[in-house]
Image: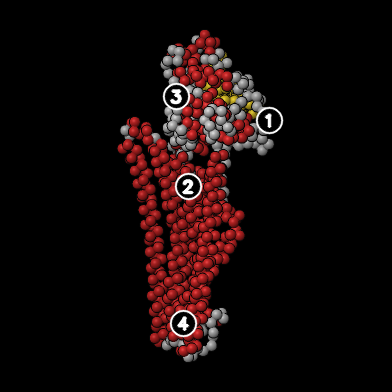
Amino acid sequence: MSEDEHGGFSAVRESADGNPMAGLLGYCKPYWPRLSVGLLAALLTRASRLVPPLLVAAALNRVITTDGEPGMLADAGLLPSGTISGQAARMALLEQLVVVAALAYVVRSVTRFASRYLFQSTAQKVQRDLRDDTYDHMQHLSLDFFANHQTGAMMSVLNQDVNRLEQFLNTEIRQAIRVVATVGGIGIIMFYHSPELALIALAPVPVIGLASWKFLSWIEPRYRGIRETVSRLNSRLENNIGGARVIKAFNRHGFELDRVAEQSDRYHAEKVGAIRLRRAFFSVLRLMTGVVFVAVLWVAGSDIIRYGMGNADPRTVGAGAFALFFLLLRRLYSPMRRVGKTANKYQLAKSSAERVFGILGHEPQVTSPPDAYVPESVEGSVTFDDVRFGYTDDEEVLSGVSLDVEAGETVGLAGTTGAGKSTLLKLIPRFYDVNAGAVEVDGTDVREYDLTALREHVGIVEQNPYMFSGSAAENIAYGDLSALDEGTEAGDGEGGPGRRIVEAAKAAEAHEFITDLPEGYDTQIGERGVKLSGGQRQRVAIARALLNDPEVIILDEATSDVDTETEELIQESLRSLTADRTAFVIAHRLSTIRDADRVVVLDDGRVDEVGSHAELVAEGGAYADLWARQAGDEAGAPADD
């Protein structure tokens, strides 16, 4: 079994068009006005955060010592630049410092709210768009995609991966702005006061940037492996939870625990390895910041001791600037250490983006042609013209099947397990395309039809029909959602099921058991219809297909889970309902198809016999042998493919 069959999505990643993170930014384009305002607000937030340290420096230089340099705020015209002397002047300057500080905190609060709100709300909008588009695209992919990828893995993409991209947009974009604005602003302030100390303080910046870039190459394969392992673990858990009944029946709790533990241990080992690398990287960054702090303290302190403080010598800084450097150092290396975390988050997001945009770039194998045929109506004739098909290149399931079915004809299909009966009928609604030959509806190749238009005229009831979590009425109405809005004539009163829902349920012999449910048609049937028996689910599925009123109906073991008495009731209703439809019936019990217009017997992907039930029994061939083994409809036939 390939890695993709375990939900690894390795091949799907290759379908991503270009850099997947560029695709993520493409989803941000419709919201550029909001992001532009958010960017401006974020820059103002960073700028306002640098004002308090400047005010502290000004207070030390002008209010406390009175003989210090005016500073950047004075040069910017926010404070007086002249000599400050006397208590009154110092109090007046202090009042100005308090006003500027208050304004800075107001600006910071307002812009912080604006930037966070705009970025977070935009990230939510992108998340919504991305999940909707990914889900919609996934639904249009061919069935082979769903056959090769498990539900747990696909849910992991739609939930965890899309959520991770939202978190990246929500948090890390703002952090990147924080790094650029903070480092730039602090660099300007430091060079203004002391180029020598600024060079010492900023020396690690390019080193941290280079180390963060290198960190990406170190951590990338590990996070890719972690995402793959999470998908396989989710698939295993989803598989086991869905198969809880079988696990209990065969008492395989220990066996399944071992399989889950194996995947869990692998995830644990890969995660711990990534944590070890990440923690080591961040520890090195912290060590570098400590070295710079010590270096600035030594150089600045030594110069002050040797040459005095402030204006006494151009090689030294004043008390305010000395304090300012250490205040800014604290602010400088907090965002710089964040570079490593952002690099880490970027790699996680990129890994998720590869999977999401890999799905978006994965093209379905079955699509409508450019000038698709949309018929005004369909009669229902079906032709199989030398059809050849295989799910893989290694094995051919159908080998030259040819069959003409007239509109309104009922055709029963019989044969042993693996003969190709279900596969043949899957070609009518184009769940798969033939490898050779053609399948035609009303004389037109199904590959020329618009897919939606084609499938509107084909109804399908499978052996194990899927039930959606919801009410019985909602599951039947899935065949035609407008039926939910229709009135009822079944005596259920206002708010009851639509008239056509009830009629379809009666035709499928489902009405009686549904009305016996605790809340009738409004009864919640549980996930996958778990509250219904197999036969009840089949009858609901038949009602759903009949409500769709298709011209071609496919019943693939549609009555395999009902008792003989119920099957006879269903068949009686189906005879009248299929009178004007083309019907294909695969039956577990051959008695189900004995009244078909024709019976087609398949053997190893080929048509072996064709004729009525009586003709085939009289011929004494394969069908007669199957009929004899069943002894009427008391013995069970082999399960169908």
* Relative height, residue 562 to residue 357 (above, below): above
Which of the two discs, 4 and 3, labels the residue nearer the N terminus? 4
Q: Do the residues labelled 1 and 2 touch (CB within 8 Å)?
A: no
In this rendering, the label closer to the viewer, 4 or 2? 4
**Circle 2: element type:** helix
Q: Which residue is drawn at 49% across and 66% down?
A: 179
Q: Can residue 434 be seen in this view?
A: no
- Check the picture and name the quadrant holding the N terminus: top left
Q: Do the residues labelled 4 and 2 touch (CB within 8 Å)?
A: no
Q: Residues within 10 Å of mark 3 (few under 14, many from 20)?
A: some
Which of the two discs, 1 and 2, labels the residue nearer the N terminus? 2
In this rendering, the label closer to the viewer, 3 or 2? 3
Q: Which residue is drawn at 42% across and 77% down?
A: 296
**Circle 3: element type:** loop
Residue annotated with mark 1: 376
Q: How crowded is mark 4: few (under 14 residues within 10 Å), some or many (20 or more)?
A: many
Give, as a three-letter code, the residue at label 1: Glu
Give, as a three-letter code, the residue at label 4: Ala
Residue annotated with mark 4: 59
* Relative height, residue 440 to residue 207 (above, below): above
In front of the other: 215 or 515:
515
Position of residue 253 in the picture relative to residue 181 (left or right)? left
Disc on res. 561: 3
Residue annotated with mark 2: 159
Give, as a three-letter code, the residue at label 2: Asn
Report, in whole angstroms, how far the alpha carbon at label 4 lies from the one at label 2. 52 Å
Q: Are marks 3 and 2 in contact (CB under 8 Å)?
A: no
Report, in whole angstroms, how far the alpha carbon at label 3 lies from the one at label 2. 35 Å
Q: Do the residues labelled 3 and 1 touch (CB within 8 Å)?
A: no
Give, as a three-letter code, the residue at label 3: Asp
Which of the two discs, 4 and 2, labels the residue nearer the N terminus? 4
